[in-house]
Amino acid sequence: METEAKPWLSHYPKEISSELDYGKRPLFDYLKEAAEKHPNKVAIHFLGKELSYKQIYVDALKLAQQLSKLGLKKSDRVAIMLPNCPQSVIAYYATLMLGGIVVQTNPLYVERELEHQLGDSGAKMIICLDQLYPRVAHVKEQTKLEHIIVTGIQDYLPFPKNILYPFVSQTKLPKKREFRDLTHVHVFKALLKQGQLSISPVEISPEDDLALLQYTGGTTGPAKGVMLTHKNLIANTEQCRHWMYRHKYGEEVILGALPFFHVYGMTIVMNLGIMQLSKLVILPKFEAEEVLKTIATQKPTLFPGAPTMYIALINHPNVAAYDLSSIKTCVSGSAPLPIEVQQQFERLSGGKLVEGYGLTEASPVTHCNLIWGERVTGSIGLPYPDTEARILSLETGEEAGIKEIGELVVKGPQVMQGYWKRPDETEKVLKDGWLYTGDMGYVDERGYFYIVDRKKDMILASGFNIYPREVEEVLYEHPDVKEAAVIGVADRYRGETVKAFVVPKAGQTLSEEDLNRHCRKHLAAFKVPHIYEIRDELPKTSIGKILKRELIAEEQHRHLS
């Protein structure tokens, strides 16, 4: 009966169980176990510096002891405003050891965004880069911040990079003496030197106690804090680990180009890496040339990423000079993966690149294509173990038929507790344990799911429903197109019409006539863009997701003016 209700289970390989045991331990226990059983195993490689699991755990303990001295108590919020670096891992686990709640904070936030997130979360402390200190200091009085802890990229660099870094950085860094008279400002390295290896034990209920407030992008209003427990994060990390069943404990090398302050990078790189005793090769930001060099020298076996990362690599002029053959697995998330990109990257690396699906509210992964089994092109794959999924009709609210488009709803141990201090918003998306994703999709007779677009991104033109993803897929098939984004814009006659923003590949030129001919060959007439705008680049998030909301805002401003 179960396979009738969940037809996807019949496609699971024998190595993947439909139900998993998540235990009853707090998230930080995985780091403790790794340090105690494998103290000398390399945990992190950072720009030439290597740190063992014991070193990471000891530093996390010392920092936790110092945070406790500064007054951090269970359920207090600690903002971490760092790029990928050893400190971001240490600060994350130190906070959890005390029962604190991590508030991941994008280092690119401007003061308005920072003030909103710190104010909304009620963060008591923040750990930030020294070069971001002026931004934090400027908003402190409008928040509940009591302590600011500063660190620098150079703090964990090998000699002589640690000496040279402040001189090559483009930003003028504050001097430590500037903090001496400020009782609320502390230096990360100094805290570790003073730290002890003992902390008072804190009782953690993995199912009930929050580990993370992860703020959504704020595409439909102010960013909301997604409440995720230790159990939510452990469940999703275990689900990821079981999905990658051929990966071996203690033998994998994970490339951390996705930022840890994004829930996808946090789960599938940092938490997964520590859970399976991997070596994390982390980079503070994505730069195509640096990533190619790192793959060639550090030989990662797992490279989670976003479509724009793979696009940047396959279009890099020197990609053929680098050996990418160590890569066994790539899981792409955060945006639809164009088929052409998948095929080209697999040819370059020889590894598997599969598309998954998730959202912040689900820790984040709910679906993925099989890595070593049948995968269906254009599909987001099958629901994870212990995850239920349905498509609901927008008209009736009932379960839609096979291949009928409706809203994707999901249920599972990785689904959030709700939005921080927003019960009304929570009620809109959480109903009887089901998370209403806002994504439009369908399911086929075998249980493979497909996303056609965001509910709010659907274009209604002359009574026709048009899904931007379908048009974008066609644009990506053009041999000279590097990136594409499609939105609906106001139209006097059609209500809305289709506009395409296109970035050509290096050295290529594109014309509206050429693009129009290509689209007319592959799309019904009502789906063909009426407007094309050719650009050098598209606005993106820190993980390379194209920011359609900025393109929409530009169009709205243009329409009003």
Image: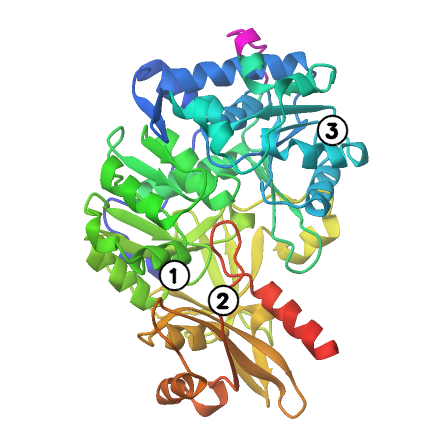
Q: Nearer the viewer, mark 1 or mark 2?
A: 1
Location of the C terminus (image quadrant): bottom right
Residue 373 in view of the camera: no
Q: Residue at x 40, y 83 (%)?
A: 515
Residue at mark 1: 380
Task: Please report the residue visible at 48 percent of the width from the left and 39 percent of the height from the top.
Answer: 260
Q: Which mark is residue 391?
A: 2
Q: Is residue 64 visible?
A: yes
User: Between 540 and 380, which is closer to the camera in this rendering?
Assistant: 540
From this view, report whether residue 246 is shown above or below residue 23.
below
Give residue 531's position: percent from left, percent from top.
53, 83
* Kind of residue indicated by mark 1: Ile
Q: Specify which label sits upstream in the sequence, 1 or 3.
A: 3
Neighbour tally class for label 3: few under 14, some 14-19, many 20 plus, Cα within 10 Å: many
Numbered disc in front, either 3 or 2? 3
Q: Residue 549 occupies which quadrant of the picture?
A: bottom right
Q: State which quadrant residue 206 falls in.
A: top right
Q: Main secondary structure of the magenta part?
A: loop
User: Residue 423 vs residue 99: left or right?
Assistant: right
Q: Secondary structure at mark 1?
A: loop
The count of marks equals 3
Query: Is 123 left, or right, of 285 in this rendering?
Result: right
Under mark 3, the amino acid is Leu
Which residue corresponds to mark 3?
Answer: 145
Mark with earlier residue (1, 2): 1
Cα gap from disc 1 to disc 3, whole angstroms: 41 Å
